[in-house]
Amino acid sequence: MNIPMLLEMAAGAADDREAVRCGDESLTYAELHDRASALAGRLVADGVENVALLALNSVDVPVLQFAAAAAGVPFVPLNYRLTDAQLDAALERLGSGLLVTDDGAGRELSLPAGIVAVPSAEVRAWSTDPAAPRRDGVDVPGDAVALKLFTSGTTGAPKTALIRHRHLSSYIVATVEFLGCGPEESILVSVPNYHIAGVTSVLSSTYSGRRMVQLPTFDPARWVAVAREQEVTHAMVVPTMLNRILDELERLPGGLPHLRSLSYGGGRMPVAVLERALAALPGTSFVNAYGLTETSSTIAVLGPEDHRAALASSDPDVRARLGSVGRPLDTVEIEVRDALGQPVPVGDSGEIFVRGDQIAGEYASHSALVDGWYPTRDRGHLDADGYLFLEGRADDVIVRGGENISPGEIEDVLLEHESVAEVAVVGVPDTEWGERVEAMVVASDGHVVDEAALQEWVRRRLRSTRVPSRVLAAAALPYNETGKLLRREVKQSLRQEVVGA
Amino acid sequence: MKPGTRLHSTVSEASVVVVRPGTTDVLTCGGQPMATEPSGGATAADATDGEQLVIGKRYVDEESGVEVLCVKGGAGPLAVAGRVLTVKSAKQLPASD
């Protein structure tokens, strides 16, 4: 199976349906298919080896994504928030190919010899050339690399993740009902195109026949305005976006009457934000999805029924599921293993391993698969009914005097304190303990950070080894653009505090 | 058959893509073995009143483990060793992306 097959099917069965809209521009499935086929013909004729993209979302982005797939070459969307030097390093690693850029990007890149930069307007002209030879790409092998993503690297040096046609098409065919959406259904896409969820959103929208409504970049006021004006029925957000959307909805009453489903993921969702969202959007179903770049997006889902049951339950175990990422998809297997690689009993913490047709687990340098299983480097546990709870990255575990401490557990307790709006708990090098626990806290409105009170708060709820030896107040915490906490930076600033003291 | 192999009916417009090859080598459509190339024209059996294959549906045979995805609709039915393949009922997943 391959990606061109997904578009061919949609274009064949729903050719005059609107596929994508950005502002005043839109394309039908037939137009999307035709442009992608024309552009693919050009890419093949020019011998292009990679199709890199450095641009905001537009109707040209799905054209480019499907054109690269039909040409059988990798699509390489780049993070436009990186510095020029970081982008140069990424392009150096890519080696050769086409770099499609927004006209006004204002970059000063020293492109490696093999990279040819082309403005997106010119690429659009290629894709709309009626004389261009067409290439539909239905014969592209499933083993061909469809996607190269430079992973965010919140814990270390970025890596080039490779995802093949068979991984992405397996994921779509197994999880999406073909043309399962009615012509009135649409999804508001505001995640960046270089995020795995941005890539899979194009594929699942196409296969389900659901219209994509794009925002060039996320802005809460625009998001609410477009959701209302376009009567969008579905949307996907990361936790930081949701909080800002809720602020906007409070400012501009009227709700989102057409929004049937809101999915969230890509970072830890504070239960308080979720409860606020459930109250503000009573007619909307909520879906929490967990997945990674290396797993072709979603591998576990907490669905609308799970949300309702958890909210309505007085059983603390069921109630707690509001903080879980739900159950694994039918088509993947999830195991929680200990440090020796053995599965742990239900309820025990360990590293999450996953296996299935959609799991790539591969980098340009090596495959990370172990007997077909991908070690996610995420820590978590399963409850008796198979619900998965995340506890943070394995690399973030604090080892204090030989004891493994999960920062997420301490953060959850601190977040329950009324004075805490945001918190990061990290391990800081310590001569006596190896590492000691420290916390950085952003105070909630009208409160101040009281170190002794918060230490006592943790001591009364968790073991004494979990009590942060320092609690520092901060104006803000560092996050990446999808809302992931950058612990490395928190650690660095806590270390500098010591040096400066 | 390998995953991703595209097979065309010789009796109708239908075509499928192999999702899981299972243990079988021969898949039939409307009683005739399917071909790796489109047949390119109507055949005597074109008017078959066999079950219509529906684009986007997955068809399975539990005994051999074969699973295919219909990528173009047309007259069927699909069969392995005389056993007619059934539509795989996919559990409806909430949209996550």
Image: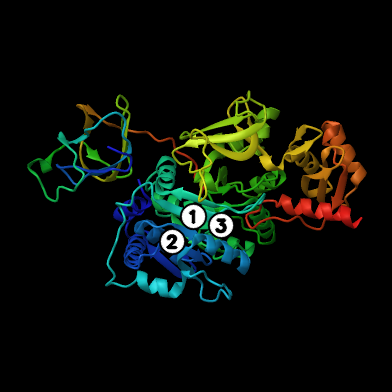
Q: Earlier in the sequence, mark 2 or mark 3?
A: 2
How far across and down, in percent of the image, does residue A71 sit?
A: 35, 59
Q: Which residue is mark 1?
A: A148
Q: Are marks 1 and 3 in contact (CB under 8 Å)?
A: no
Camera-nearest label, 1 or 3: 1
Mark carried by residue A32:
none
Let me know if residue B81 appears in the view: yes
Which amino acid, by three-letter code, is at mark 3?
Val
Q: Nearer the viewer, residue B94 or A54?
A: A54
Q: Nearer the viewer, residue A125 or A9?
A: A125
Distance between the alpha carbons at the discs numbered 1 and 3: 17 Å
Distance between the alpha carbons at the discs numbered 2 and 3: 22 Å
- Please, which chain is the residue tagged with disc 2 on? A
Is the residue marked by circle 2 packed among few (<14), some (14-19), or many (20+) residues within 10 Å? many
Distance between the alpha carbons at the discs numbered 1 and 2: 9 Å
Which amino acid, by three-letter code, is at mark 1?
Lys
Q: Nearer the viewer, residue A28 or A82?
A: A82
Let me know if residue A312 appears in the view: no
Mark carried by residue A191:
3
Camera-nearest label, 2 or 3: 2
Q: Is residue A68 above or below residue A333?
A: below
- Please, which chain is the residue tagged with disc 3 on? A
How far across and down, in percent of the image, does residue B29 sit?
A: 19, 37
Give the SS element for disc 3. loop
Q: Earlier in the sequence, mark 1 or mark 3?
A: 1
How far across and down, in percent of the image, does residue A264 sit?
A: 59, 48
